Every structure is written in C-alpha cells, then in structure tokens.
Image (cartoon, grey):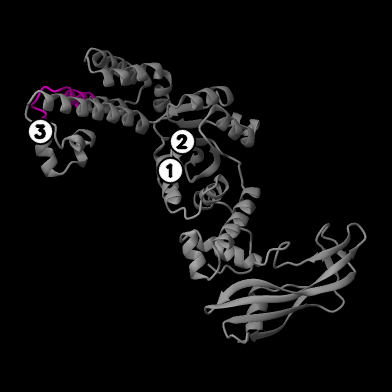
Amino acid sequence: MLIKTILNRIQKYSSFIYESVSMSEEGQVIEVQIRPRANSWAICSGCQRPGPGYDTLPARWFEFIPLWGFQVFFVYAMRRVDCSCCGIKVESVPWAQGKHHLSESYKWFLARWAKRMSWIDVAKAFHTSWENVFRSVQMAVNWGRDHIDLKDVKAIGIDEIQWQKGHHYLTLVYQIDEGRKRLLWIGQHRKVKTLLRFFRWFGKNRSVGLQFICTDMWKPYLKVIAKKAAQAVHVLDRFHIMSHMSKAIDEVRAKESRELKAKGYEPILKGSRWLLLKRPKNLTDKQEIQLKNLLQYNLKAVRSYLLKEEFQFFWDYISPTWAGRFMDKWCKATMRSRIEPMKKVAKMLRRHRELLMNWFRAKGQFSSGAVEGFNNKAKLTTRKAFGFRTFQAIEVALFHTLGNLPDPEMPHRFC
C-alpha cells in the first residue's frame, strides 16, 4: 500500500491533493508534496472565507506524525488570497494553524504521548524539542478548556499544594461528584482573592447550584465559601482533622523525648514516632509489641495517642446530634489533659463545630479522599516538571494530566 493511499485514508483534505512522496537525500526524512486542487479557491486566514488567489509564496515544511521512525514533512507553497474583506492575506490550511510548523495531527499525537511520559522523554523519543511538546500540550489544553462541560457540577473539593521553593502555593479546585472526578481550576497562591477568582470563572448560577464543598480549615477558603456558596453543605474532611492531631502528637513526643533525655531517663520514646502516628491496623507484628510495651508508661505522648484513637469513634456516628455530644465530651476531657498541643486541637474543633457536623449531614459520601489522591498526582507532576519554571507551564501540565479534558473528533487516533 502506498503512503499516499494511507494518508488519503486517515488524513484526507478535500481541497488538496497529496501529489508525491519521496525520501530526502539524507534518507531520514519523508517528504510529502501537497498541491491545491484545480480551480479551488484559497481560504482567507482572517475571515475564513474563500477568495481568489493573489500569488504563491515559497514552499513551507510542516512536520507530520513520524512513520516507522522516519520524520514526515508536508511540503506546500502557501497561496496569498485577495480577500474583499481583509485585503491580501496568507491562506488558511487545514493541517496547520498560523505560522506553526507542526501539523495539528502531530500536535495531538505529541500531546497524547505527553500523558504517558514526561515531556522531555516525549521530545527525545520523537526527535523534537521540549518547546514543541509544550506548545502541543498547551494547544490540547486550550481546546479542551474551550469545550469543557460544566453542567451538573454539584460537589467540589478545594485544596492547595506547595509549588517551587519557599511558601509558594497553588489552589486547586476539583469536581468530586460520583462518577466524574477531575481538576476544574488552578489559581496562584491560597488567598481570599485566589478563590474569589474561581467563583467568578465558575459563574454565579453554577455556584448557587453547588450542593457540597469539601475543604480543610484554611481561613480564606472558609470566608469565601460562606460568601459565595452559603447554600452548599461545607464539609471539613476527616483527613485534615486527623492530620492536625498527628502533628500535635508528634510535637508532644519530640518535646517529651528531649526532656527525658535531659533528665537522664531511659530513651523510652526513641523510635516511637510511627508507633504513635500509624493506625493500629497498619502496624506490623513487631510494632504492635513495641506499642503495647510503650502504652504501659504514663507519658504525655501516650495520653495524646489514646486521645487521638478515642476520637476515631467520632467518625462512626450517624446522627449529628450524638456526634456533637461525643465531640463536646472529648474536647472537655482534652482541655483537662494539660497537654498544650492537644488542647489547641480541641479549641480548633470547638471553633469549627458546626462545619464538622456537616460530615454527618453529607452522610460521609463526600470527603477529600479523592482530592488527596488528585493532589498526590499533582505533586508527582510537579516533581516530573522538567522545565516547568512558570505558572503557565505548570497550569498546562496539571490540566493535561488531571483535567479529563475533551478531545476533538478526528478521523484517526494515532495513540
């Protein structure tokens, strides 16, 4: 089967003809000569209307999808159009946009491979540049964002990830509806203004239609959600609550370990960090024995651990009323424990009591479990970020990986 036959089968352009196919003198490049059909008018690149030809420019090369490891180029002499609306304009061709030397098919080919490998690996595999891969992914993301369907978004999760060195954060908003989970929006920083930009982009009508919002206890998020989506059930997720308790336990353990060492006591708490932070069901047999021995001591770290494990029963309640009574009792006992880091956690729970009860009003069906899963993928994307030095680049990469964006209908998918 001739290459021209294959091209006509998978990439046919009605107003153009594949005239000839040849191998370059170097033997590593396939050249496909293209010419316009007889009596066909060129399309103005300004208004997209047909018009008579004015003259012909020197031939341009457009890179197409590689074939058997050989680079493939379309060679075509662009016509200029004498357009009645726009004047003299270079024609628009269906296989490439503007002055780009990559064909649209090749861009989509690179963009799809960029979901499977890092961008630099894609560039090496197909003998192109990192910039070409980036522009291809950017094209795919822009097309997908322009055609995104935002109907029936009822539940969203909001969280942040650290980006670059220092205190640089990205605010990420995900759709977490059952059966449709994806990245919806990315913003720089984690300020009030950041989340306000999301709600402006999302639109007032869609914001009013939100039923569930899952976040952590970051104050700017709480403030904006109360203003822009007050009707939604705002769920403070258990993952973030328990992470605060784990940090408190670790603080108590570290301080108490130093105090015991200073007083010359046996280093009982040495190597106990993960014994106190892991759930009992996740401990190894050896760790179970070590924890059992540690629990015999009346230490603040041990008492903090027992308070944390007692609080786990909070999530087993069904009724918000009974859950609230349990939490009040737990907070009262914790405030009497004289363990300052745990007392801070109890005060935090009291401040956010009403929002914590929303976990039960939502019947536990919406949590940041999906959000944390997405965040882990986002962090992996940033770690693989060869060349992602700008917000624009990381935004494109995250949408490409996590956005579940639509693709255009094409006569043939190459990957």
First to last magenta residue range: 292-307
Judged from the image, the secondary structure of the residue bearing numbered disc 3 is helix
**Horizontal side of residue 108 vs 35, given as left or right:** left
Q: Is residue 403 visible?
A: no
Spot occupied by residue 411 in the image (x, y as percentages of width and height): 64, 68
Please state which amino acid type lies under the numbered disc 3: Lys
Q: Main secondary structure of the magenta part?
A: helix
The residue singled out by tag 1 in the image is 375
Q: Is residue 44 visible?
A: yes
Callout 1: 10 Å neighbours few (<14), some, many (20+)? many
- Mark 2 or mark 1, which has the lower sequence index? 2
Spot occupied by residue 282 in the image (x, y as percentages of width and height): 21, 41
- Mark 2 or mark 3, which has the lower sequence index? 2
The residue singled out by tag 2 in the image is 159
Q: CA distance from mark 3 to mark 1?
A: 35 Å
Please state which amino acid type lies under the numbered disc 1: Asn
The residue singled out by tag 3 in the image is 292
Q: Is residue 164 magenta?
A: no
Callout 3: 10 Å neighbours few (<14), some, many (20+)? few
- Mark 3 or mark 1, which has the lower sequence index? 3
Disc marking residue 78: none
The residue lying at 42 percent from left, 46 percent from top is: 379
